[in-house]
Image (cartoon, rainbow, N blue to C red):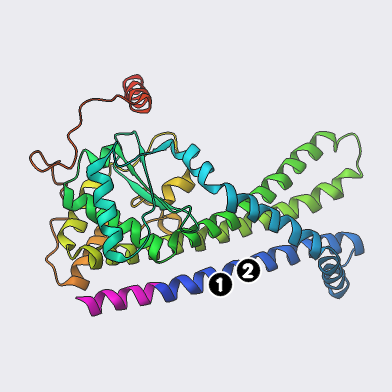
Amino acid sequence: MAAGLQNHIWNNNLRSIILLALYPLMIAAIVWACTFVIGAAGTGDTGERAAGMANALLYAYWPLIFTVVALWFLIAWFFHGAMIRKLAHSHPVTRKEEPALYNLLENLCIAQGMPMPRLEIIETHARNAFASGIDEKSYCVTVTRGLLNSLTKDEVEAVLAHELTHILNRDVRLLIITVIFTGMIGFAAQIAWSNIRYGMLFSGRNRKNGSGIMVIFAIAAILWLGYLATLFTRFALSRSREYMADAGAVKMTKNPEAMMSALMRIAGRDKIPETTDDIAMMCIENHKPFLGLFATHPPIKSRILAISETTNTPAPDIFSTPPAPTQDRFHVPDGPKNPWLIRERGQRKKSR
């Protein structure tokens, strides 16, 4: 079993390295294409003159481009924790507040010889969890109240091991880097699109603005294509990382049955209200059917079959959802005391 799991991890690591290497090439290609459009507009030529001007512009402005990119990275690097907490509506918990959960995570960390990450909870009935952070000081494991109230102790342990595997393999750091790359290009595309809309308002008064709008439109099109390309690689990277985290969790807990049953209980109940796609992509499950290349997670069925094949463990009935445990449930819910749960319940009543 260990050899099969290790090969699974090595194969996914190789795919992830290849995918991540595409990002710098995409950024370089996007910047050059935008400068080529500017050069073509300035010279009236789409051949060597435009390419030469694009090269000259890129050479002249690369310090400015580098500075903007560096500032973007620094802001995201140092403030990502607070941003994630605000977007996810999570709150930190201590051993005194959640002793069973805290001890379960601590024991896993001791067994792996790793510092314990910060532990946070989202007060929602959804069943999900995710890891975040860029270093030992900022690593964090976040779980939902719904997950704790619906899974057994072994299943919660498997979920925690899944998230710790993301941390051990530096998945969370890679994920934040991909989010920064994607957000940077998406932000630039939005600015270009806003300029197009602004220019169209005044183009009727000044015909000379027409050519300028076309240039901005071409740049916006390039940026949006680049944004879609980074999304494709980001989603593919996320999909491969989920397989690897499942394998790592099984290796850590020696309990493939718990990992498979946890995935089955989470499936279809993973949607966290009032959160963003970036948060959803970090979760153990992000169910969005029929998305194909745009899917951030592989199907639950594929993940369960991968665990079954690599561990030689019979797969459960993947077409049925096991009922929530009654006797060995990790937490026994005693009603929503947190305002997030109360608000979520109120929203459900309104939607009916």
Q: Percent position (x, y) of residue 97? A: 29, 36
Number of disc labels: 2
Residue 85 among those drawn in magenta: no
Q: Percent position (x, y) of residue 19? A: 50, 70
Magenta segment: 1-12
Q: Residue furthest left?
A: 327
Using the image as rendered, state which of residue 228 and residue 163 is in the foreground.
Answer: 163
Using the image as rendered, state which of residue 245 and residue 91 is in the foreground.
Answer: 91
Compared with 217, 207 (above or below) is above
As measured in the structure, the alpha-carbon distance from the residue carrying label 1 to the one carrying label 2 is 7 Å
Residue at image position (28%, 44%) is 268
Compared with 104, 254 (above or below) is below
Residue labelled with disc 2: 24
Secondary element at tag 2: helix
For the residues labelled 1 and 2, say whether their Cβ atoms are less than 8 Å apart: yes
Say which amino acid is labelled 2: Pro
Q: Percent position (x, y) of residue 151? A: 19, 45
Q: Quadrant of the N terminus?
A: bottom left
Q: Main secondary structure of the magenta part?
A: helix
